Image (tube, grey):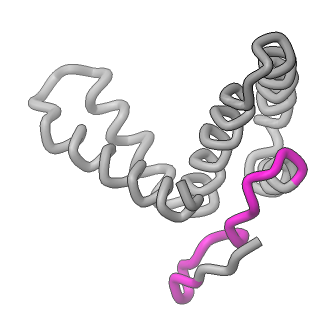
């Protein structure tokens, strides 16, 4: 795992490598309720990779869960993302700024995950 410090409000865990085992360990630490979903996604990705003889499903798995971990290891950022998503979903106000902030948060998470 690579360390990344944000001072006293830094991440809960270092960013793990994008391997199934490392991602599973990270999810177990920061969002254990999501382990069944991760396990199912990994099973489906592995099956699809074998059937299609392509690594694309496994890359998609690593991308999806790498971003998830990058987001969730920063609780305030993850909560802000959920708040912004609620604003967009509600459709009660102009969501242009919320969408732009969601995009920025996700880009930051992808960069942290090395994607």
Q: Residue furthest bottom?
A: 7
Q: Is residue 33 left or right of residue 56?
A: right
Q: Position of residue 103 (x, y in %)?
A: 31, 45
Name the foreground residue: 33 vs 110: 110
The quarter of the displayed image where residue 48 is located: top right
| Badge count | 0
Above or below, 9 relative to 56? below
Q: Residue furthest left?
A: 94
Q: Quadrant of the N terminus?
A: bottom right
Q: What residue sits 68% from the left and 66% below the top?
A: 15
Up-down relation of residue 54 to residue 13 (above or below):
above
Judge whether 63 appears above or below 58 on screen. Answer: below
Q: Any magenta on residue 55?
A: no
- Taking depth in this image into account, of 5 and 76 the one nearest to the observer is 5
- Magenta segment boundaries in residue numbering: 5-21
Residue 17, magenta (yes or no): yes
In terms of image quadrants, where is residue 3?
Answer: bottom right
Q: For the stretch drawn in magenta, what is the main secondary structure? A: loop
Does residue 15 sit above or below 62 in this rendering?
below
The part of the image, by quadrant, that contains residue 45 is: top right
- Name which residue lies at 36% across and 34% down: 85
Q: Position of residue 56 (x, y in %)?
A: 66, 29
Report the residue at 69% width, 42% height from top: 62
Seen as rendered, the residue at the extreme front is 53
In the image: residue 71, left or right of residue 43: left
- In the foreground, 106 or 98: 106
Q: Residue at x 82, y 44 (%)?
A: 32
Q: Nearer the viewer, residue 84 or 70?
A: 70
Residue 50, horizontal then vertical, whole percent: 86, 18
């Amino acid at each position: 795992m690579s360390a990344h410090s944000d001072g006293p409000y830094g991440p809960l865990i270092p960013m793990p490598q994008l391997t199934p085992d490392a991602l599973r360990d990270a999810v177990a630490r920061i969002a254990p309720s999501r382990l069944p979903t991760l396990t199912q996604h990994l099973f489906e990705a592995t099956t699809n990779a074998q059937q299609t003889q392509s690594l694309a499903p496994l890359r998609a798995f690593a991308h999806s869960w790498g971003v998830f971990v990058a987001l969730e290891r920063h609780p305030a950022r993850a909560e802000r993302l959920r708040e912004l998503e609620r604003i967009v979903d509600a459709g009660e106000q102009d969501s242009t700024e919320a969408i732009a902030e969601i995009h920025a948060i996700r880009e930051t998470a992808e960069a942290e995950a090395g994607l």
